[in-house]
Image: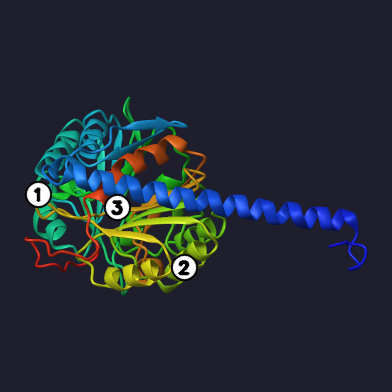
Amino acid sequence: MNPHEEGVSPVKHRDSIFLMCHRTILQSHRTILRAAFGILLSTLFLVSCGTPQKFSQTAPAPVTEQGMTLLWKHDIKTQALHMIEHSRTFCNLDIYELSDADILAALAAAKRRGVAVQVVVDATERHSQKTALPALRAAGVSVASLRIHQGISHLKMLITDGPDGGVLLGGMNFGAGSWNNNDASVYMIHPNNSYLSLFHWDWLRAQGHPSAAPKVRLPLVEDADIHRQVLNALQQSRQTVVMEAFDLSDWDVKNELKATTQRGVLVQVLLDPGQYPNRRAADELKKIGATVRFYQPLQGEWMHAKILDVDHGRFFLVGSANFSHQAYTFNHEADLVLQNVPHFDQSLQSDLVPLMAGGSEYPKKRASDGGNTVAS
């Protein structure tokens, strides 16, 4: 075709051809990525047929980047104990579920050393109320219950001073069996003042004192702002979206995942099998080409993480908030929004790939709960 005969300049014609070629190459690259990931899943599945346990019981090693460390499973408990045991003047814990005997003993020991220990627990979580509350009060530790109207106080945040001081924040509860769950938290050595401000706000509210919400600074985000950050990260995705989700039920997030997949972005999602809304989310996403698998529990543990990783760590969100309307609208939540953390992406991939390979197309019931749980 002669561009002059069609009223198109040679420059515009050249640019149009270049754009078409660029889109074709990009789409081919994404197709290759999908095929490679599918082959990798198939290969790992065949290898795992005789020994599935190695996929779900070995957590990724801690990885440090930008003064932050991403931790998984039992390493989170180890870090929490180090922080509490080496605290000097203060130790603040804002937690949904608290019942681990070692953590409770460490808090009591810190109180005996003269550390100012303050603990906020959710007013509705039964383990916190029946185990932690009486144990801490008997040890003289200052503890209060925070009641959230129509929701829960769902944070998992520890703040201490001392040589191992800093902030530990993520999705991991401090329950007796929490450490077996597939979950992650981040330890930061030099946090800004937002974390202490958030704790003090919760402490005052738990004491029954009216208090204005603090203005927090990134990377910390809380409550409704988490929803905006999740949608923003998905809208800016270019190549890959990886998600580990205990509960994926928010309509806006699901719709954005669909739109992201339809734009040609490679979307991979690992879901907990015990949350009924996840079944609908999986069906909807698989229909449009996303890769979705259900976690395969071995000993009744949960796929409890709430992680969103966009473009290999360009955006990386981790914290307490499920991808649900309840979390974004009613609960009290805290997440971290991190940028340019490729080592965190690699850690997540080392967790995700074998779990996707050892997972299932459809949810299988957990022996401990019959296949249904309450959101935590």
Left or right of 93, for residue 216: right
* Residue nearest the viewer, comparing 134 with 297: 297
- Image quarter hosting the N terminus: bottom right
The spot of residue 111 in percent (x, y) is 19, 37
Judged left or right of residue 20, residue 244 is: left
Q: Amino acid at mark 3?
A: Ala
Residue linked to disc 3 = 305
Give the tally of numbered discs: 3
* SS for callout 1: helix
Identity, as a three-letter code, of the amino acid under mark 1? Ala
Quarter of the image for residue 16 reads: bottom right
Distance in Å between CA atoms under marks 3 and 2: 21 Å
Residue indicated by mark 1: 135
Amino acid under disc 2: Lys
- Which mark, residue 258? 2
Q: Quadrant of the C terminus?
A: bottom left
